Image: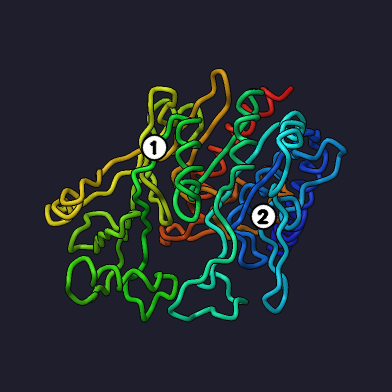
Amino acid sequence: MWKLLKLCIFLFFLIPVVSWVSWKLKKEIPINVLVIDKTTPDERFSEHLSFFWMINQNKWVKRNGEEYDYATDFLGFYPKKNGDYTIKDLKNSAPKDIAEMADTLDLVFFADTYGIYNSNWKDHPDYGKDTISFVYGGMKSEELELMRELKRRKKAIIVEFNLFASPTSAFVRKQTEELFGLKWSGWVGRHFTTLDTLIDAEIPKWVPELYRKNYNKEYDFKRGGIVLVDNKEHIIILENETHLNDRFPILKSTQNTQEEYNVPGEIYYPFWFDINTSDSRNKILANFEINVNEKGKQLMDSLNVPLEFPAIFHHNKDYDFTYFACDFSDNQMGIYSSYFDGVENINGAFYSANQVKDRKMFFWKYYRPFMTTLMNSIHTRSK
């Protein structure tokens, strides 16, 4: 018995060492990546941390051999102590400089352009107040120009929600839509574990206000559900059991996507998303479905909101473009697990299967396998 126990202890310490050594010995892949993330209110950098986890796990490095650092290797908003901050972006970059940058890049990842407000930045002096003040954010003309130059050069572009919604201007949004054949409906949504504003501080203050304005009655939701709002200040609240058969939006992948990207056919998606359409340029790899009862269907139909809509758009013929109509990469991952080869084989240790609202389960079951295939494809095309 004692010998067996000693063997178990020995293996317990040996396996992580072997896993780390195996990762360390993997061949480094030089890829020139630019990440743009304007929604970084704290130093967790959750909007792009999962993406850097994938970069590290796949041994992508800079052209000079240095490792990428999720805390410094991006353009956007850099929070400091006591409400101070710095901004590093493409503002005032000349077209010539942007074209030269596009020549050197293999991939640009737009993690989030929503930006910083007093409502999501705890160090802002007006944090917690009812008034909303804008600090920084929105896609600008310089970033649109970079997209154009990348597209001309057939470089890889990955984009996530929120690209089209406020605070991006209508002009920049329209130009971006035309560039990639997408059209934003004006609607965005999110699942909340509870719709009770006294329990969940993440529910925006404007949700109950907008509900009262739209329906002329008090906001009195206690269960979980899905909130949808559009750019004309319409709002739909779908409450569990009252309107919903399934608590979460369901991400459904096509059969080809399941086989090519090694992802499940269906999985719950518990965070922000937007509703878009596409012209024939893009292939739809997966769709969102909101499973409602008759009462929920009446609400959705009243404002012509579809119950099923695209989740992942992809074009990889004359240029390489992927749009995730959700916060695909937003996850509170621990970066250190990316330093171990084969860590996906014990992924169940990193989340609880009963906690479907936990985005770590989404990361391991869907994000990691999907991004592995996508990034391998980008590497192959960049050679």
Residue 313 image offset from top left, x and y in percent: 45, 33
User: Which residue appears at 44% of the width and 37% of the height?
Assistant: 312
Answer left or right for 160 relative to 221.
right
Q: Residues within 10 Å of mark 1 (few under 14, many from 20)?
A: some
**Does 226 appear above or below 95?**
below
Residue 237 image offset from top left, x and y in percent: 26, 62
State the residue position of label 1.
183
Q: Quadrant of residue 222?
A: bottom left
Q: Amino acid at mark 2?
A: Gly
User: Which residue appears at 39% of the width and 46% of the height?
Assistant: 267
Answer left or right for 244 relative to 207.
left
State the residue position of label 2.
76
Residue 271 image offset from top left, x and y in percent: 43, 56
Answer left or right for 143 relative to 188.
right
Query: Is residue 349 visible from the viewing direction of this image?
Result: no
In this figure, what is the number of numbered marks? 2
Give the SS element for disc 2.
Answer: strand
